[in-house]
């Protein structure tokens, strides 16, 4: 669905950009989205986005998610890992292991800026693995895992996309040094492969799992809700196509609103 089919009420949110510090002093960029037109809930959603070329392809959808959360009275905090987006560091000088610390710093920063007691953590793709691990440190009120994927299967997908694009355009694939224009050394590959999900769920943490596999849409835990995601995967769409999964975003916001009311 094209973004133009939805109405984005910019007056419903107060966007507050900030540069904050990771534990080792690295400068990280983030944006707090505060509700304006409705009362603020006593919680904030920290969004752990994907990495590499997926960062650009999912950026518009996550921006829309923050706006929709604000319209529901829920503050949210989007941030860039070091070496990504507008945060400090070059991609060749930082490593994925740092991103776990960046997520912890983002959670603490979001809690203080929003002046709330509760935090929910949301992650998309590899960001869901980071969100899952961050949740173990911050005692969150809720966790959202949106198409969670570990480092090894994600790298396999990326390599296949690189080879497919190379075949389509008649050039040699460069998976040894980069994937889809993103530098990816052997050291980076090993580090990313270490970011795997254990697949376990906390027995008492409300968790929303969004997946495209019907076989996975079931859980024996009363605290885990599973939903089938809509349409084409947003991380496979070119950034300028402006793909926004409105139904999925609505599902996330409705679920988080219910958790906030409980």
Image (cartoon, grey):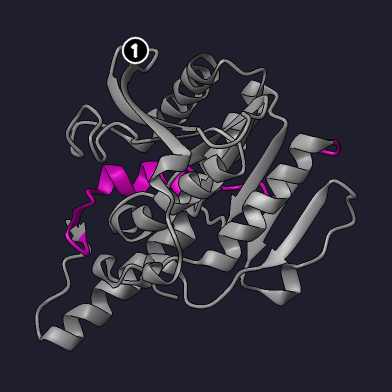
Q: Nearer the viewer, residue 165 or 224?
A: 224
Quadrant in the picture for the N terminus: bottom left
Residue 205 in sight here = no
Q: So how many labels did they put on this image? A: 1
Seen at 39% across and 45% down, the residue is 10
Position of residue 112 relative to residue 73, above or below, is: above
Q: Which residues are magenta?
A: 179-206
Q: Nearer the viewer, residue 214 or 32?
A: 32
Image side of residue 29 versus residue 122, left or right: left
Question: Percent position (x, y) of residue 256?
Answer: 69, 44
Q: Which residue is mark 1?
A: 24
Residue 183 among those drawn in magenta: yes
Seen at 26% across and 39% down, the residue is 84
Seen at 26% across and 48% down, the residue is 186
Question: Percent position (x, y) of residue 226?
Answer: 75, 60
Q: Nearer the viewer, residue 54 or 159?
A: 54
Position of residue 172 relative to residue 248, above or below, is: below
Question: Percent position (x, y) of residue 21?
Answer: 34, 15
Image side of residue 7 versus residue 147, left or right: left
Question: Percent position (x, y) of residue 151?
Answer: 46, 52
Quadrant in the picture for the C terminus: top right
Q: Nearer the viewer, residue 200 or 231?
A: 231
Residue 173 in sight here = yes
Residue 30 among those drawn in magenta: no
Seen at 34% across and 58% down, the residue is 54
């Amino acid at each position: 669905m094209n973004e133009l089919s939805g109405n984005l009420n910019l007056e419903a949110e107060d966007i507050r950009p900030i540069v904050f510090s990771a534990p080792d002093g690295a400068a990280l960029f983030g944006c707090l989205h505060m509700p304006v037109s409705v009362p603020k809930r006593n919680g904030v959603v920290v969004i752990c986005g994907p990495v590499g070329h997926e960062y650009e392809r999912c950026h518009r959808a996550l921006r829309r998610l923050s706006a929709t959360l604000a319209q529901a009275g829920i503050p949210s905090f989007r941030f860039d890992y070091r070496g990504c987006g507008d945060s400090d560091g070059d991609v060749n000088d930082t490593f994925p292991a740092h991103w776990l610390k960046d997520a912890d710093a983002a959670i603490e920063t979001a809690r203080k800026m929003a002046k709330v007691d509760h935090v929910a953590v949301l992650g998309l793709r590899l960001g869901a693995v980071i969100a899952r691990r961050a949740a173990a440190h911050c005692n969150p009120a809720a966790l959202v895992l949106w198409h969670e994927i570990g480092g090894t299967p994600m790298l396999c997908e990326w390599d296949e996309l690189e080879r497919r694009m190379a075949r389509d355009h008649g050039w040699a694939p460069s998976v040894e040094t980069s994937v889809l224009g993103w530098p990816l050394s052997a050291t980076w590959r090993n580090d990313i492969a270490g970011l795997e999900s254990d697949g376990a769920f906390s027995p008492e943490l409300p968790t929303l799992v969004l997946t495209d596999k019907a076989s996975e849409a079931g859980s024996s835990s009363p605290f885990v809700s599973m939903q089938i995601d809509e349409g084409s995967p947003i991380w496979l769409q070119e950034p300028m196509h402006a793909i926004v999964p409105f139904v999925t975003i609505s599902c996330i916001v409705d679920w988080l609103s219910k958790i906030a009311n409980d």
